[in-house]
Image (tube, helix red, strand yellow):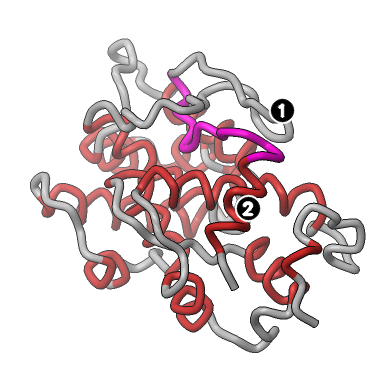
């Protein structure tokens, strides 16, 4: 299986996606199937500062088991809780102070993302971890040691917040690969990551685009069973 050919096919179909969206950025979503603002197609300078880097990190926590528009609402709600100053951007200190001083307001702000009691704790965990990093790039193992950070979240943080080349095996990607006969339904996250990672090559820009394109394609053909029924874009890669 040549995953670079799959990437090129998806890129030709949907073009550059401009992930990870930043709520304060006015860029638009090129495909209009999710939230509209915050995207930056073909601009890989993001995150441009520590505020945007940390926004991506907490967004990776909030997006667990929910859709991006719900995360966007939660992030905007949190930013609006900066009652004393104009909001400059997300920082771990902002999250920890807010959680300590206004727990109920904090939880209400992130309610749109679901599991708000859990995520309230997870956001505090990742904030303390980020402070301890002191500007260093975290290893995958270090991220996985933080309660609330699983495989997909760790890979998302590494790829989009730090520009490290990581394959992200989200639900869409696994459904696509199962449909194409490349992996089995019972294959776990790390096995699938290894299968794709041993074949796919490129720099961090390619890894970022590949994941974003997988999500865009997945939203069109792999949200309802039977998955991939009308997927004519990737049918040429089907091996069974």
Say which residue appears at 70% left-offset and 84% top-offset. Answer: 185
Determine the secondary structure under disc 2.
Answer: helix
| Quadrant position of residue 231 | bottom right
Residue 168: percent from left, percent from top: 48, 62
Q: Which residues are magenta?
A: 12-24
Q: Quadrant of the C terminus?
A: bottom right
Q: Which mark is residue 115?
A: none
Q: What secondary structure is the magenta-colored segment mainly?
A: loop
Residue that sits furthest to the top in the current view: 86
Of 79 and 81, the residue lying toward us: 79
213 relative to 201, above or below:
above
Residue 38: percent from left, percent from top: 51, 24
Q: Which residue is mark 2?
A: 214
**Left or right: where 105 falls relative to 32:** left
**CA gap, disc 2 and disc 1:** 15 Å
| Quadrant position of residue 115 | bottom right
Q: Which residue is mark 1?
A: 32
Determine the secondary structure under disc 1.
Answer: loop
Residue that sits furthest to the left in the current view: 134
Task: Count neighbours of disc 2 (C-alpha within 10 A) and say few if under 14, some if 14 to 19, many if 20 or more.
Answer: many
Say which residue appears at 75% left-offset and 49% top-offset. Answer: 219
Residue 99: percent from left, percent from top: 34, 42
Whether 16 is among the magenta residues is yes
Task: Count neighbours of disc 1 (C-alpha within 10 A) and say few if under 14, some if 14 to 19, many if 20 or more.
Answer: few
113 relative to 73, above or below:
below
Say which residue appears at 21% left-offset and 64% top-offset. Answer: 139
């Amino acid at each position: 299986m040549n995953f670079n050919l799959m990437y090129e096919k998806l890129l030709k179909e949907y073009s550059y996606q401009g992930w990870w969206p930043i709520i304060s950025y006015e860029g638009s979503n090129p495909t209009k199937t999710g939230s509209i603002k915050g995207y930056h197609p073909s601009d890989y300078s993001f995150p441009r500062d520590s505020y945007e880097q940390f926004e991506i990190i907490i967004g990776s926590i909030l997006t667990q088991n929910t859709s991006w528009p719900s995360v966007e609402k939660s992030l905007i709600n949190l930013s609006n809780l900066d009652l004393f100053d104009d909001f400059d951007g997300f920082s771990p200190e902002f999250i920890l102070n807010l959680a300590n001083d206004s727990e109920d307001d904090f939880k209400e702000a992130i309610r749109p993302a679901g599991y708000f009691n859990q995520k309230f704790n997870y956001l505090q965990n990742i904030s303390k971890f980020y402070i301890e990093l002191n500007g260093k790039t975290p290893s995958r193992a270090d991220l996985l040691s933080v309660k609330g950070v699983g495989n997909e979240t760790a890979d998302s943080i590494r790829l989009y917040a730090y520009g490290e080349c990581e394959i992200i095996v989200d639900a869409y990607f696994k459904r696509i690969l199962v449909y194409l006969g490349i992996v089995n339904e019972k294959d776990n996250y790390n096995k699938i990551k290894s299968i794709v990672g041993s074949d796919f090559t490129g720099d961090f820009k390619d890894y970022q685009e590949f994941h974003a394109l997988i999500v865009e394609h997945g939203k069109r053909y792999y949200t309802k069973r039977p998955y991939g029924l009308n997927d004519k874009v990737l049918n040429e890669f089907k091996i069974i």
